[in-house]
Amino acid sequence: MPPLAQDEIHLWRLGVGALEVRPQPQGSTALLRELLSGYAGTDAFVIERDAHGKPRAPALGGLEFNLSHCRNVLVIAVTREQSLGVDIETPQRRVRSAALAQRFFTRAEATALAALDEAVRAAAFVRLWTHKEAVLKAIGSGLSFGLARLEFRLDAAGEVCLLESIAAEAGLAKDWRLHRFEPCPGFVGCLAWRGPPRRVRHLPAVD
C-alpha cells in the first residue's frame, strides 16, 4: 500500500475482474474494507452508514473515504482529515436529459443544456450530474440537500467549468475543489472536497 501523505488524495480504480467475483453492493463493501485495512494496518473496524447513507469508519480516526460504482467499475477515494465525495457515471446511459434538467437543476443549468446540440446534450447532462453528486456526497447530505441548491457554469461545448454558487450552509463556492477524471474509457467522474488544494494520485486498477 503506498504511503498516504496528509495533503494527498488517493483515487483507486478497481475494474471489471474485481467486481465479477463478488455481488454488489456486498462486493464493493468488501473491496473497500480490504483497501482501508491496508491503509490502517488492521481489520478491527466497522464500516457503517450515517443517516444519509454515507459510509464511514469512526475507528480509523482521521482516515476519510468515499466510493462510487457504475456497472462493473468501482472508484474509491481515500485521504486524511478531509471529507470528500466521488461519483462516476457513463455518458452512454440513456436519460431524458432535458426533462430531468428542468425538474432538478437550476434554471441557468437547464437553459445551458437545452442550448446544446442534441447529440452532445445527454453526455453533458451526465458530466454535470457527476459534479453535483460528488459535491453532495462530500457535504454528506446526498440528494436530500437538493440538486438545485448548487449551480455550475457550463461552456458552449457543455463542459463543466465552474461552481458558480452553493447554499450558504455548504460554505463558499470558491472554497470547493473539483477534480474531473475518466476512470476508464466510456466513463466520466468527479472528485470534490471543500478545503485547500490536495494532490490527487491516481492509482492503477486492481483486478
Image: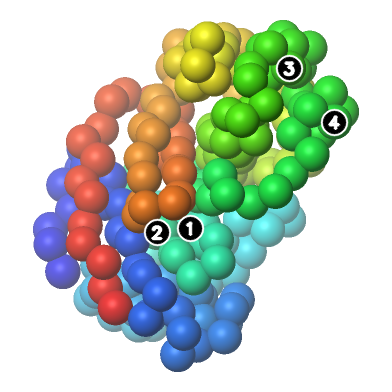
Dot 2 or dot 3: first in sequence order is 2
What distance separates the C-alpha of mark 4 from that of mark 3?
A: 10 Å
Q: Secondary structure at mark 1?
A: strand
In the figure, residue 21 lies in which quadrant?
bottom left
The x and y percentages for residue 23 are 57, 85
- Amino acid type of the residue that numbered disc 1 sits on in the rendered structure: Leu
Dot 2 or dot 4: first in sequence order is 2
Q: Which mark is residue 176?
A: none
Q: Which mark is residue 99?
A: 4
Q: Secondary structure at mark 4?
A: helix
Dot 1 or dot 3: first in sequence order is 1
What distance separates the C-alpha of mark 2 from that of mark 4?
A: 31 Å
Q: Is residue 50 visible?
A: no
Per the image, the residue denoted by label 1 is 67
Q: Are marks 2 and 4 in contact (CB under 8 Å)?
A: no
- Amino acid type of the residue that numbered disc 4 sits on in the rendered structure: Ala
Per the image, the residue denoted by label 2 is 76
Q: Are marks 1 and 2 in contact (CB under 8 Å)?
A: yes
Q: Secondary structure at mark 2?
A: strand
Q: Is residue 14 visible?
A: yes
Per the image, the residue denoted by label 3 is 114
Does 201 appear above or below 147? below
Q: Are marks 4 and 3 in contact (CB under 8 Å)?
A: no
In the figure, residue 84 lies in which quadrant?
top left
Looking at the picture, tell me which residue is in the foreground, 199 or 106. Answer: 106
- Amino acid type of the residue that numbered disc 3 sits on in the rendered structure: Ala
Which quadrant is home to the N terminus? bottom left
Q: Secondary structure at mark 3?
A: helix
